[in-house]
Amino acid sequence: MQGTGMQEGELFFGLNGPLDAVPGHGQCRAANFTGLQDYASAQGRDARRILERHGIEPRVIGDPESHVPCQSIADTFEYCSTLFDDPLFGLHLGQAQDADVFGCVAALCRSAPTMRDAMACVVDYLPVVHSPEASVELIEGPQVAELRWGANIDLGLNDQAHLQALVLNLKLLRMVGGPGFDPSYAKLTVETRARDMEEIEQIAACRVHARAGINAIGFPVQALDRPIASANRLLFRLLGGYLARLKQANSATIAARVGSYIRGALPTGSCSIERCAQKLGFSVRTLQGRLAAHDVKFSDLVEGERERLARIYLQTPSMSLEEIAERLGYGEQTSFGRAFKRWTGVTPQRFRTAH
């Protein structure tokens, strides 16, 4: 860490290297297993054997920064629920953990000026630091705001992970919301037995709706404007700047891969997000989620590549407008002409003449 002079009286700190490695596609931080060893030991079991059963290296018990497949986490939690005869295993594991399971995002939230700033950090950076498959959004209504979460990939039965997420997200909200923060309600997609709801609501300290279409925690929207007692302007700038650059680097990587596909697929006339996802080894939903996490849309990337290539092709005299339209994946030259004028304000022929 080093300081660099900027404007007079202002100091900015930078980092020579990353704080931690970023989880790859289909991965999540092993911090999700924090507390599993103690829970298993109390039941006379060895957590390391449980992890090995699901193809996870036992060393991750002591290395929360390592990365494991999201599917393995979901499967391990469901197995533990059965093994320990605990239908609320995820909920109980979450009670033994704290918001630092989310890595440096939790530290960034603690240093944020307001709760609104903290929630923006969760939405922006949790998919970068914790798991690229995490889907998080904040929905603001006239009276109530909702912090929603889910997964960008199909993990099958995943009830225990959602129960764990309920507790961890509540802890994160209470950490930044302060002593007076009270959730209004919670929604869960899990199939919870009626006799377990009393314990869930007791831990959540609010009404919980099971078998809902989404996972969410609702709270008064005015709470978003609360200042955070632990706010630290310098730390917020330092960590925020670091994570913003990390997000940008990740965005460039996925955008570059998609852009490479688009350039190769346009001339074939079969450029689609379905084919792109298949080529990159993602589901369509996962690809959309990874792009959306960085404020990028597949259709925007297609338009961007078409405009960039069109400008290059139009400066190649030997290529006819019909050939250019075909190479860009347009069925008709007139369609290309309309699109180019929309991009540049001039027709392809006028652009070619000027250049």
Image (cartoon, rainbow, N blue to C red):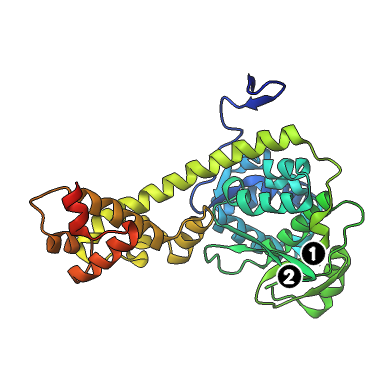
Sequence-first tag of 2 and 1: 2
Task: Give the tally of numbered discs.
Answer: 2
Q: CA distance from mark 2 to mark 1?
A: 7 Å
Residue at 53% from the left image edge and 66% from the top image edge:
154
Left or right: residue 318 compared with residue 107: left
In the displayed structure, 168 sits above or below 143; it is above
| Residue 127 shows in this picture | yes
* Quadrant of residue 232 within the rendered picture: top right
Q: Secondary structure at mark 1?
A: helix
Residue at 42% from the left image edge and 45% from the top image edge:
253
Q: Which mark is residue 221?
A: 1
Q: Secondary structure at mark 2?
A: loop
Taking the view exactly as shown, the residue that stands out farthest to the left is 318
Q: Are marks 2 and 1 in contact (CB under 8 Å)?
A: yes
Left or right: residue 204 compared with residue 284: right
Left or right: residue 303 compared with residue 144: left
Front residue (pair 324, 154): 324
Q: Residue 350 at x, y = what percent?
A: 20, 56
Q: Residue 269 at x, y = what percent?
A: 22, 66
Identify residue for label 2.
141
